[in-house]
Image (cartoon, helix red, strand yellow):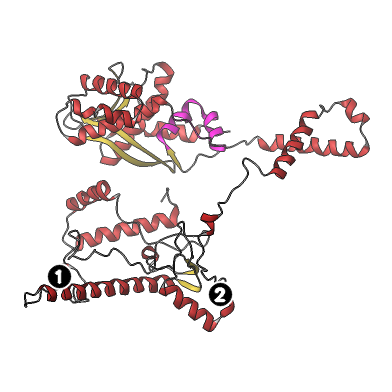
Amino acid sequence: MVRDGWQSGRRHIDAFIDEAASFQRNGGTLSSFLRWLEIAEAQESGLKPSTVTVNNDAIQILTIHTSKGAEWDAIAIPGLNETNFPNSGKSGDSWIKSSGSLHLELRKDTLDIEDFTLPSTGKNSDANKALEAFNDRWKAKKREEELRLAYVAFTRAKSHVFGTSAIFGDGKESKNPSELFVWIREFVLARNPERLLSDAEHDGSENPNQVTKKTAVWPLLPKRQESIMNSAKLVAESQEVSYENILAASEEDKALLRDAAALIEERRRYSAVTEVFLPSRLSVSTLIRLKSDPQELALNIRRPMPAHTARVARLGTEFHTWIERHFESSVLFDDGIFGSEEENEREMAVTESVALKKLQEAWLASEWGSRQPISVEEGFETVIEGILFRGRIDAVYKVGEDTFEVVDWKTGKVKEGDDLTDAAIQLAMYRLAYSKLHNIPLENISAAFHYIPANQTIRPADIWDEAEITRLISSVELS
């Protein structure tokens, strides 16, 4: 609810409860439900989204299936062309022609269409006729399903439906309007002909977008460019305003100078924002910046700028991906885990490939290379002071009967002093998130950085608890 707002969050929670209730009604247990959720997240990108709600503040683009049950004042249905909508589908998607299709007897709609049966005559001609008849019935069924879908689409509108059928798309061949568009056109002509916005006919010519390519002048159109150049020239030739300039200026120029001075003063006074509020969602790395350089963070929140991904960062990402794949594969290590030289050359530069291999070898030679974690790249979301923090814990190890350790892999240089103290906030957040996620007492979880190039594991002392993290979020003033 923090992430998506009250209405959307409430809807997601209701949809989740419905899924749980349905699972229980079918005889599922709590443990099997949790396992099912894990599989759904890993294999199917989570549960299906909750139904769409109408948003009057935005233009919503969605499929007809997901629009079911909702209603808008006006809707638009583009692409009413032959083979597109109604969609003709694949010619061989019945169980007879496609091994991936479910046999008709196993489908819910088995009674909606007469299935294929092999004639008892044993003649090839009779078998071919039976196949053709079944294919015709299959096409008719698919057309009926498309018309049902069209009914859903057109009944989403309270008052206005806007349908389009383009003669040309991106290719050279023209496209005929579908039967749906023909029906709409006939209806409009019979009831409200003035509502037909355009009724172009295809004259057999080629696609005009293919015949005459659209061109434009870059970077600026000539007139606009000339205006900007003249403005730049005036700025370059201008003189600094001084007391003597003002005395010598005409009354009209003096008035302009006073206006300019007032505008400059107003901009100076109001451009200095005295307070910056933290967003409702933050990454763990942002929390580190909140402690180490709050003013720089405030500037970045006020005016976000894209950051260049450094080679070291790319290398770290590649290493973390390899770690996750290494543990998921559950096989003994061999040279093949690095990939062939050809694969490496395709994925990254040779220098980065060599650097990645060194990191892999160094990690495998460390104390962690022979240990099995209980969790790898575990994602989390936790709310502190009304702010949603999201992140991923590199690895978690069980070190005792009821004790655990979260570990963060570092591919750079070992940090010391204040830099290490600031970085330790990351471990504090991971430790706190894992404690909340699995309902484990915070004192039973330790935390460590492992710097792979140096083969050095550092466990910072006095890692913050939730109260200290909360104090940081609520006490730091951004400006």
Real-space Cα separation, disc 1 to disc 2, in angstroms = 46 Å
* Residue type (three-letter) at the residue carrying disc 1: Glu
Q: Nearer the viewer, mark 1 or mark 2?
A: 2
Quarter-wise, where is residue 86 in the image?
Answer: bottom left
Q: Is residue 64 above or below residue 453?
A: below
* Quadrant of the image containing the C terminus: top right
Q: Residue at 59% across / 48% down in the picture?
A: 215
Say the numbered circle drawn on residue 196: 2
Region of the chain picked out in magenta, as a range: 283-309
Say the numbered circle drawn on residue 252: none
Q: Could you say whether the residue bearing mark 1 is in a helix, strand or loop? A: helix
Tell me the residue that label 1 is attached to: 105
Question: Residue 444 location, x and y as percent?
Answer: 25, 31
Q: Residue at 31% across / 64% down in the picture?
A: 89
Q: Residues within 10 Å of mark 1 (few under 14, many from 20)?
A: few
Q: Is residue 209 above or below residue 293?
A: below
Return the residue nearer the eye: 85 or 364: 85
